[in-house]
Amino acid sequence: MTTRFYKNITASFIKSGLLCFLLLFLFSCKKGSIVGNNASDTIPAKTQPVVFLTPTYDPLSLDTITVFNSTPAVKNLSRTDLVEISGVAASRLNPGILYIHNDSGNLNQVYLTDVTGADKGTLNLTPVSNRDWEDIAVGPGPVAGKSYVYVADIGDNDSKYKSIFIYRFVEPDLAGKIKPVVNIDTVDKIELKYPEGPRNAETLMVDPQTKDIYIASKESNTSKIYVASYPQNTSAVTVMTPVVKLLFNKATGGDISPDGTEILLRSKEIVWYWKLSAGTSISAGLLTKPHHAPYANNEPQGEGIGFAADGSGYFTTTEVRDYPGNPTTISFYKRK
């Protein structure tokens, strides 16, 4: 009788244990299921702080560089309908050709001109639209030996867009063509995000040595520089890396020289210029003290800036939509 009693007790414990295990298992599965489907029950991931390096020089104590002429050669654009020019870049493939474009709400077109302001043709970027194109650059890209045009759809006055876009395409060979209209049907779409949320920007720069893409924000008394390192993803969104925070007021354009040793950053009022020592990266160079570069304040709303393809100087352009009677101009500051 005692043996049977212990056997019954043992069986009871086993059954109870199995039942408890089963209940715990089902509860765990159910709880896991709730956590997976209800965001309020999840543990939020820790966000990494966004850290920018900050230069130590006094921006009010900059000297003016003397390697460029202080008085520019100024030409009016022959096309009077281009009144919102926001960027300028020199072709590497087609000698003497400059690429320019209008900004928000305009056609998805890049226009061709030269140092005289002549109408040299149009490129239609058929796969994309112009939400707010604010800058343009020329540099290397995925295929070795090819030159690429980069168009920056990065304008965001209300800081509301979750993503910005860089459109990249191979430079077309325009040799022998008179005022061509060329459809660009193959365009890489590089979607980028800022690490700390939307912001306005009007400056695109491409490093000719590394193929990295730099964006400079347009803010009061601040310009935050971000980088999207090469190779840029064309099938997923890339969160850019913070680089440097400059005490620069409302940047409207910038460029890196074809040899990668010079940087320009402009606003409507001033131009900063960096000359990098050998082996200095763009990110490290931006931490060094710049110079003021010549700017004649001859543009009612100066936005574009870009080095000549042969390094002989730099160009600036302006918007004139809100300044009736002012012609759209291209200014060239020649290297001495």
Image (spheres, helix red, strand yellow):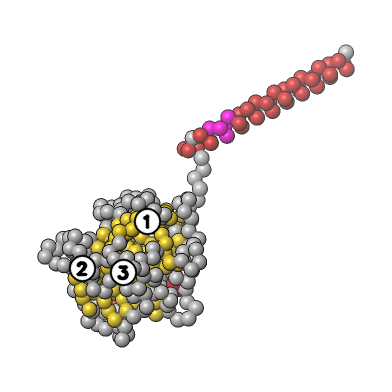
Q: Is residue 38 left or right of residue 59?
A: right
* Image point (49%, 35%), residue name: 38
- Badge 3: how crowded within 10 Å, few (<14), some, or many (20+)? many
Give the CA distance from mark 3 to mark 1: 17 Å
Give the farthest residue toward the left: 325
* Image point (32%, 63%), residue name: 135
Give the CA distance from mark 3 to mark 2: 12 Å
Q: Amino acid at mark 1?
A: Ile
Residue 98's tag is 3
Q: Earlier in the sequence, mark 3 or mark 1?
A: 3
Query: On the image, which quarter does residue 219 sit in?
Result: bottom left
Residue 133 located within the stretch drawn in magenta: no
Quadrant including the N terminus: top right
Residue 282's tag is none
Quadrant including the C terminus: bottom left
Secondary structure under badge 1? Answer: strand
Query: Does 233 appear above or below 14?
Result: below
Give the farthest residue toward the front: 176
- Badge 1: how crowded within 10 Å, few (<14), some, or many (20+)? some
Please state which of the two labelled residues, at mark 2 or mark 1, is closer to the viewer: 1
Q: Amino acid at mark 2?
A: Leu
- The residue tagged 1 is 184
Please state which of the two labelled residues, at mark 3 or mark 1, is closer to the viewer: 1
Q: Earlier in the sequence, mark 2 or mark 1?
A: 2
Secondary structure under badge 2? Answer: loop
Q: Position of residue 91 (x, y in %)?
A: 36, 69
Give the farthest residue toward the top: 1
Q: In front: 2, or 57?
A: 57
Residue 77's tag is 2
**Which span of residues is magenta-colored?**
30-34
